Amino acid sequence: MSLRVSIEESYKEAIKSKKLEKANTLRLIKSAIKDKDIENRTSESSKQINDHQILALLQNLIKQRKDSIESFKIASRDDLIIKEELEIDLIIQFLPKQFDEKETEEIIKEIIKKHFNKIIPATLLLIWLYWGWMPPPT
């Protein structure tokens, strides 16, 4: 299911269950997507933005909220800080899972273990080329 459809379904569900804060945040997301769709239009094409562009948009919305939180901290507006943090939590639900450092290390180790015979010769070749050395004849 595309992100656009997922957001639309979450919005409908929030409206039906009368969760106004969630519905307002999802409406804001839908509005931002619609704005990007309009911006993306040309006279020849009326293509909508794709999921990758929606992900970038969602990340941008999170960044905006984090910037707002910093401003609200300076102004001691705890009520607005909580509102922005709740919006961030809702937006994050539509982003792919972010790996922590340990998970990333494990994935990299697994890839190296699986492709070790391909990685080492290629790495040595790059080192030799970088330093101007010639690889030994095979």
Image (tube, rainbow, N blue to C red):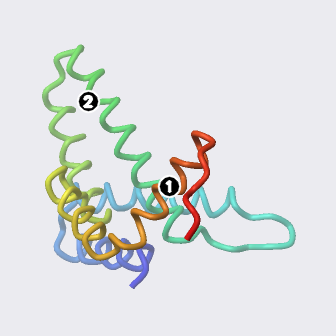
Q: Name which quarter of the figure residue 58 lies in.
A: bottom left
* Left/right of residue 37 with respect to residue 18 in the rendered view: right
Residue located 37% across and 73% down the image? 117
Asked if residue 123 is positioned above or below residue 138 in the image, the reply reads above
* Left/right of residue 79 with respect to residue 62 in the rendered view: left
Dot placed on the residue nearer the N-terminal end, 2 or 1: 1
Residue 80 percent location from the top left of the image = 21, 32
Name the residue tied to disc 1. Answer: 32
* Left/right of residue 125 with respect to residue 91 in the rendered view: right
Most foreground residue, 29 or 125: 125
- In the rendered structure, which amino acid carries the disc numbered 2? Ile
Residue 89 percent location from the top left of the image = 20, 53
Asked if residue 37 is positioned above or below residue 117 in the image, the reply reads above
Most foreground residue, 48 or 116: 116
Asked if residue 2 is positioned above or below residue 15 in the image, the reply reads below
Specify the farthest residue to the bottom: 1
Residue 99 tag number: none
Residue located 33% across and 70% down the image? 116
Most foreground residue, 40 or 79: 40
Q: Name which quarter of the figure residue 81 lies in.
A: top left
Residue located 39% across and 62% down the image? 120
Quadrant showing the C terminus: bottom right
* Left/right of residue 80 with respect to residue 122 in the rendered view: left
Quadrant showing the N terminus: bottom left
Residue 69 percent location from the top left of the image = 26, 29
Q: Residues within 10 Å of mark 2 (few under 14, many from 20)?
A: many
Specify the farthest residue to the right: 43
- In the rendered structure, which amino acid carries the disc numbered 1? Ala
Mark 2: secondary structure: helix
Residue 124 percent location from the top left of the image = 47, 55
Name the residue tied to disc 2. Answer: 69
Residue located 45% across and 64% down the image? 121
